[in-house]
Amino acid sequence: MKRSGNWEDGLAMDRRSFLTGAAATGALAAVGSLIGCGSPKSSSTEAAAAETATATATWDAKPASVADQVASTEDHEVIIVGGGNSGIVCALEIAQLGGEVVVLERSGGSTMWAGDIDALDSQIQKDLGITLDKEFIIHDLVRYGSGKVDENLIRLWAYNSGAFVDWYQKNLQAKGADVMVDTVTKKFHPENSFYSPASCHTAFVPPLKPSANSMGSEVAMPAMLELLGEAGGVVKNFMTVVELIQDETGKVTGVIAQAEDKSYIQYNASKAVVLATGGFLGNKDMMDQLGVVSHKFCSNHIGGDGRVGDGIKLATWAGAERDSSFAGSMLIFDRGALLEGEDLGTQGGTSPSFWWPGSQPFLRVNSLGQRFCNEDGPYDFVFNLATMQPGHYWWQVFDSSCWDDIVSFGTTICSRLVAEEGAKNCLLLGKFYPCTSAEEFDSVYLQPNIEQGIVRKAETLDELADIMGVPKETFLATVDRYNTVSSSGVDTDHGKAPWRLSNLDTPPYYAAKLAGWALATLGGVHVNHDFNAISPEGHAIEGLYMAGLDVGGFFNGNYPEYYGGLCMGRAVTLSWLAAHAIMGEAYPIPVESARLAYEA
């Protein structure tokens, strides 16, 4: 999610206007713009209209080079394309290692939302006595991706992520911020049936309040940008990179960018070009053609604005290989909301609405009023189960004892609704935060969403069935059976944990019509040990590096939700390592097996 203007203005926005602005930009993101290339040695862009002019046009069509339209040229050492978390981390480390760097960001400012970082063996964890089995986690993530991943990337993250957090914390402390690790982990049923490491790090400003703390990138990004400026780095906003410059050997030597006034500027790079453009969540054509089917069942695509696959397309046209066995991976929350009369259509919904407590394991029923799953699972797993149902959405149903139930559920990381000691207790999206009482939950979550039509309220279950539009007799029978298994403490139907069962018998009653919330795509370009983009033959494309969501090979099929913060954790850690490689510095923890797995 992007904020226009400087960060101070952004943080001063009131909570309602922040959400309104986010909704507007998220809705516009679905249009996207086509970034292309010219000759086999270059890549360039066309206007957004060209992308939508015909249904037969493909997202990866190569427009002609714009090199003959360049109005001015600048010479630099490193050009980073994309000023999000990964791009700024990479830029700061390059600058602190003595490099000269310019960041080109297509929007009006850097990402100010998200920020959980999964890492292993940080000093914070060591001080808390937290020990983690890195080899177990590496193999677990390989298993989670069905082996359709690059184990060497996962290994580089696992062994260097703790050192990254130490660097990150040192930098933030220089600006009065700090980093904490969330030590409150999910309780599984049956006990110890999963492995969920306490590894979620988050930036914050001391001291921690009981709830509603500004955290993550909202805190870290302003500090990082300030540090980058002090180190001599430059960020230029409203600069859309449209072409890579390659010499006769294929080496990438610079980029051509289009400025806000539509003029073209060539930026030569003597050391490296880094592509960190944030994936392709805002490009539905690209998602369709690369098999990211899940976006069709997501009602909310907030966060896709500007993420139209620029980096992946530019790298591909320069000769790089995309994920060769990509299974349509996405990061999805089960919290997208559908209002009265809204449906998913054929390309996912366009609703900006969401219901943050949507991940709570209350009763879920389909459009026929039938319970269909164990409601207690990873966000995307429960979402996937729902896509198998009629209409591809579900209803979450609960009653007026919901706060007591939520306390019992004890969900963690970003689904946490109850403030708890040792937890991050983060202010979310400028409005939501873990609560300390039923009254607070009612005022922060329940009543505002009833007013907006996201949550439906009824005094009886019969009335609720009518509001939901589900078959009444079936729905009432479903609730009766659910109450029976809940009262028994043993879910004989779906095996949900006893402490996550809750009777529906205390009016008034509530329901929310839910679908997925698409947060990020997870496929990208193949890279080597140094984070050079590589060709289908495994050869490095000299001068071209990948970072963040533009890096492929780490995830496949599904996102490992129980590893809180892994999406950003791998993105920033690997972009930090890329900075080391560009500057000729050894990695903090060398992984010889990973180095040997690639061409020298």
Image (cartoon, helix red, strand yellow):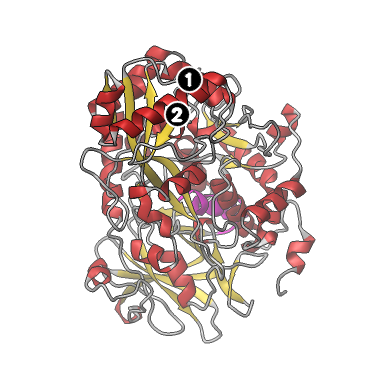
Q: Is-magenta flag for residue 97?
A: yes
* Vertical placement of residue 90 versus 515, above or below: below
- Kindly indicate whether the residue at mark 1 contacts the one at mark 2 (C-beta within 8 angstroms): yes
**Quarter of the image holding residue 241?**
bottom left
Q: Is residue 106 left or right of residue 409?
A: left
Task: Choose the circle earlier in sequence order: 2 or 1.
Answer: 2
**Quarter of the image holding residue 540?**
bottom right
Q: In this rendered view, identify the residue nearer to me: 196 or 46.
A: 196
Q: Residues within 10 Å of mark 1 (few under 14, many from 20)?
A: many
* Vertical placement of residue 69 versus 225, above or below: below
The residue beneath circle 1 is 405
Disc 1 residue type (three-letter) = Asp
x then y, percent, for residue 381:
51, 45
Magenta range is 84-99
Point out the residue furthest to the bottom here. 248
The residue beneath circle 2 is 362
Q: How many marks?
A: 2
